[in-house]
């Protein structure tokens, strides 16, 4: 199989961290002469980058592998490659039980995608995950031109009993400071207005490099990139949130006033069994300190309900915490067993119906809080980033406030994107929006001002071509959260 004109199709499942891995594999293949296609039916090589964090994600990954395997029987596909977290857990089982799979690529073998495509090995050697891309690594960015993710670290050293990320992605390791800065500059030069820093624990960034308060220093440096409008980060670990980090967020206008800090629970008993530590009262004090330092900050968290040993009293404590915290955004996961997680042998397991009921109850509490929180925007004209036409309703456009992270939070629907002057807002524009209506999770408004559009400045150091290359997403090149 020659490289020229050989078409490769990708399906990327799971979190943004997984998406970046897919984008790196696409970049490597494109550099070597392969053609990328968003149409599975015409792809000669299919790559499924899998997620295995929770049971539902694992099922979706298996279903997608089987779906893509059909293209080897009835389509143009000659080779099927499975990559990602599911490979780290079930490498041999995948190859034994799905004979259509030709090669597997673990999370630490991303740079070996060419070997998987061109080699005749059924199994690539298993290695402790150690791969970490850098600013010169080829990467094809599949998100809209105006927004992109930057992975600043990989792996995790936390011992959370419900999580197997350290097994799937290895020990925590940070990218070099200047490498992250250079990638952000490249993305900004290519037209990105927003970059989102990601990692399993971004707040530990730089610790392994001897950098104290590394995330704060990195954010302060990225805040100097003039072409960027917004810089945000996701996945803060509560005991790693320093005052220096909060002061940095408050000091720089380009740093969005937003924090995503998964707390997982509020009961001291449950958090101890999770090997997370702390308790609800300490979290409330932390939230108070965050809000005092960063006026108007938007806060997001996630919880796990139904963890082994979670009593009715523990759950009520969590409900009371949610009422008191009045967070802007919240996600709730139902606990599911993972066979090689430390929580697997714990006693006190509960039935699925009880777990689902607890999730629904907690989300009902948050829905009321979110509705009340969003009411403060009525009649306001906040700054927003225009995303483009809505996929749900062709009559409206979508945008986001700085307190709305891409993909995971609510949306701002735009009923009118044209000004009285005739100027029309476009995807990627920074605008002012008059908020006319609020709901439980979403806002509705109209554009009343469009900020001047700035052409990217020329740089003395040429931007690598791979940093500028983008492809549009479309079925079956899917990004599934």
Image: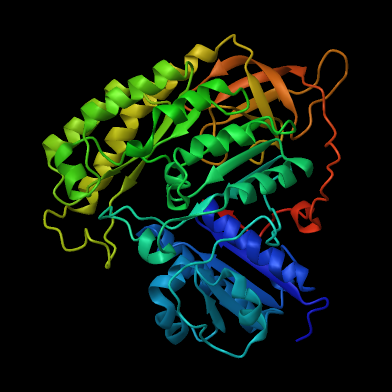
Residue 316: give x, y in percent of width and height: 17, 32
Residue 454: give x, y in percent of width and height: 83, 29
Residue at the front extreme of this rendering: 210
Is 268 placed left or right of 149 in the picture?
Answer: left
Rendered residue at 31%/38% (across/down): 360
Is 127 placed left or right of 196 in the picture?
Answer: left
Is residue 378 positioned above or below 281 on the image? above
Rendered residue at 14%/41% (across/down): 269
Is 353 placed left or right of 393 in the picture?
Answer: left
Q: Using the image as rendered, state which of residue 27 and residue 406 is in the foreground.
A: 27
Residue at the top extreme of this rendering: 379
Q: Is residue 122 visible?
A: yes
Residue 480: give x, y in percent of width and height: 54, 54
Rendered residue at 29%/40% (across/down): 359
Residue 416: give x, y in percent of width and height: 74, 21
Q: To which quarter of the image does residue 251 belong?
A: top right
Q: Using the image as rendered, state which of residue 327 and residue 139 is in the foreground.
A: 139
Q: To which quarter of the image does residue 231 belong?
A: top right
The count of marks equals 0
Q: To which quarter of the image does residue 470 belong?
A: bottom right
Rendered residue at 30%/48% (across/down): 334
Is residue 41 positioned above or below 315 on the image? below
Is 463 placed left or right of 230 in the picture?
Answer: right
């Amino acid at each position: 199989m020659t490289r020229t004109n050989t078409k490769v199709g990708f399906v990327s499942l799971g979190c943004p961290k997984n998406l970046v891995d897919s984008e790196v594999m696409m970049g490597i293949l494109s550099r070597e002469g392969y053609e990328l296609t968003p149409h599975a039916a015409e792809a000669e090589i299919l790559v499924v980058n899998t997620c295995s964090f929770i049971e539902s994600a694992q099922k979706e990954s298996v279903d997608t592998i089987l779906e893509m395997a059909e293209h080897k029987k009835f389509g143009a596909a000659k080779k099927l490659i499975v990559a990602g977290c599911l490979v780290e857990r079930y490498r041999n089982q995948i190859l034994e039980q799905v004979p259509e799979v030709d090669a597997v690529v673990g999370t630490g073998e991303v740079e070996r995608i060419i070997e998987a495509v061109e080699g005749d090995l059924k199994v690539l050697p298993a290695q402790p995950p150690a791969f970490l891309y850098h600013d010169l690594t080829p990467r094809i960015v599949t998100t809209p031109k105006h927004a992109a993710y930057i992975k600043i670290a990989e792996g995790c050293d936390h011992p959370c009993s419900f999580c197997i990320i350290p097994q799937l992605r290895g020990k925590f390791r940070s990218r070099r400071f200047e490498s992250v800065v250079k990638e952000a500059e490249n993305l900004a030069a290519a037209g990105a207005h927003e970059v989102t820093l990601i990692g399993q624990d971004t707040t530990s960034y730089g610790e392994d490099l001897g950098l104290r308060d590394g995330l704060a220093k990195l954010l302060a440096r990225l805040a100097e990139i003039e072409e960027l409008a917004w810089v945000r980060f996701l996945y803060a670990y509560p005991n790693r949130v320093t005052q220096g980090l909060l002061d940095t967020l408050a000091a720089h206008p380009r740093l969005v006033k937003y924090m995503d800090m998964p707390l997982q629970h509020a009961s001291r008993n449950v958090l101890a069994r999770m090997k997370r530590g702390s308790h609800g009262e300490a979290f409330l004090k932390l939230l108070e300190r965050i809000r005092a330092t960063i006026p108007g900050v938007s806060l997001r968290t996630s919880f796990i309900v139904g963890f082994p040993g979670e009593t009715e009293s523990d759950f009520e404590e969590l409900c009371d915490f949610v009422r008191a915290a009045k967070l802007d955004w919240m996600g709730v996961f139902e606990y599911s067993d993972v066979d090689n997680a430390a929580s697997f042998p714990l006693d006190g397991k509960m039935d699925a119906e009880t777990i689902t009921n607890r999730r629904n109850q907690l989300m009902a509490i948050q829905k009321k809080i979110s509705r009340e929180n969003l009411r403060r925007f009525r009649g306001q004209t906040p700054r927003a980033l225009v995303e483009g036409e809505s996929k749900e309703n062709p009559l409206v456009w979508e945008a986001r406030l700085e307190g709305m992270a891409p993909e995971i939070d609510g949306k701002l629907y735009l009923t009118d994107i044209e000004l009285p002057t005739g100027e029309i807002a476009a995807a990627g524009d920074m605008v002012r929006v008059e908020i006319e209506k609020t709901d439980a999770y979403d806002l509705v408004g109209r554009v009343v001002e469009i900020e001047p559009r700035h052409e990217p400045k020329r740089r003395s150091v040429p931007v690598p071509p791979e940093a500028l290359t983008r492809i549009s997403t479309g079925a079956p090149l899917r990004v599934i959260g």
